[in-house]
């Protein structure tokens, strides 16, 4: 998965984040170049995937669309890398609706939010045979704290490894990143470089686990 999955407020406005989708698209591109059969479930991105004649691209703009697409595609998957930045909250009662387009939003306008279920937490239950890779983004954390956050996430979603990164070190949309990978064997790997290089190393790790 790649990009930002949004939550609509009405027909025009929505809640989202600054994810560019570059990491997920890099993973899909590199996997395709290695000969893998790739399905890319894509939210909102600032770049478009290449090799679209070889990569199956599914547009999933909202959180529910991304969850539904994963539910269908995961049944035939060997490896699932969930790098999309899914919106953490949705609006109570669903979309406010078209009527709100004609209403002036003032300081007294109140929008109530509720937490969304984490998509990744249910994936291993849908297909227990997959290699599952998750992402965890934080900001301004010490390295040890980042590792501990990744370990908690690893346990929560029963993933094979988590790719954690500090958004405050590399701005959203950058072609470069710095990640800490924590796997289920308590191994810690640090990678810094271009997102295409990082994607290749993540694929190497996933393939190594698949061959065990």
Image (cartoon, rainbow, N blue to C red):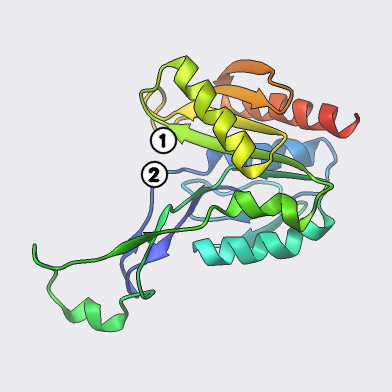
Q: Where is residue 150 in the image (x, y as percent from the top left)?
A: 55, 29
Q: Seen from this angle, which residue lies furthest right?
A: 211
Query: Which residue is denoted by mark 2 in the rendering?
Result: 18
Q: Residue at x 80, y 45 (%)?
A: 130
Q: Residue at x 55, y 23 (%)?
A: 179
Q: Residue 143 carries which label?
A: none
Q: Residue 172 carries which label?
A: 1
Q: Can residue 48 be seen in this view?
A: yes
Judging from the image, what secondary structure is the residue with disc 1 in? loop
Judging from the image, what secondary structure is the residue with disc 2 in? loop
**Image side of residue 142 versus residue 80, left or right:** left
Q: Where is residue 108 in the image (x, y as percent from the top left)?
A: 9, 66
Q: Position of residue 183 (x, y in %)?
A: 69, 26
How dense is the environment of label 2, judged by Cα within 10 Å: few (below 14), some, or many (20 and up)?
some
Are dots 2 and 1 in contact, CB under 8 Å?
yes
Instruction: Quote the CA–CA distance across marks 2 and 1.
Output: 6 Å
**Image side of residue 205 versus residue 11, left or right:** right
The quarter in which the C terminus is drawn is top right
Q: Seen from this angle, which residue lies furthest left?
A: 107
**Image side of residue 1 versus residue 89, left or right:** right
Q: In which quarter of the image is residue 194?
A: top right
């Amino acid at each position: 998965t790649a990009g930002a999955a949004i939550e609509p407020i009405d027909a025009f406005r929505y809640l989202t984040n600054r994810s560019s989708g570059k990491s997920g698209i890099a993973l899909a591109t590199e996997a395709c170049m290695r000969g893998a059969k790739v399905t890319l479930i894509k939210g909102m991105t600032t770049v478009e995937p290449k090799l679209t004649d070889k990569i199956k691209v599914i547009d999933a703009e909202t959180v529910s669309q991304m969850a539904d697409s994963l539910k269908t595609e995961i049944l035939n998957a060997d490896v699932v890398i969930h790098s999309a930045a899914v919106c953490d909250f949705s609006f109570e009662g669903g979309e406010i609706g078209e009527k709100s387009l004609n209403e002036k939003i003032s300081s007294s306008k109140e929008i109530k939010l509720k937490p969304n279920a984490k998509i990744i937490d249910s994936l291993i239950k849908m297909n227990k045979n997959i290699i599952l890779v998750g992402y965890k983004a934080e900001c301004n954390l010490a390295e040890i704290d980042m590792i501990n956050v990744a370990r908690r996430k690893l346990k929560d979603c029963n993933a094979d490894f988590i790719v954690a990164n500090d958004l405050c070190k590399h701005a959203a949309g950058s072609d470069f990143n710095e990640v800490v990978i924590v796997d289920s064997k308590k191994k810690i790997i640090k990678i810094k470089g271009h997102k295409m290089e990082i994607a290749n190393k993540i694929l190497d790790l996933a393939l190594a686990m698949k061959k065990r």
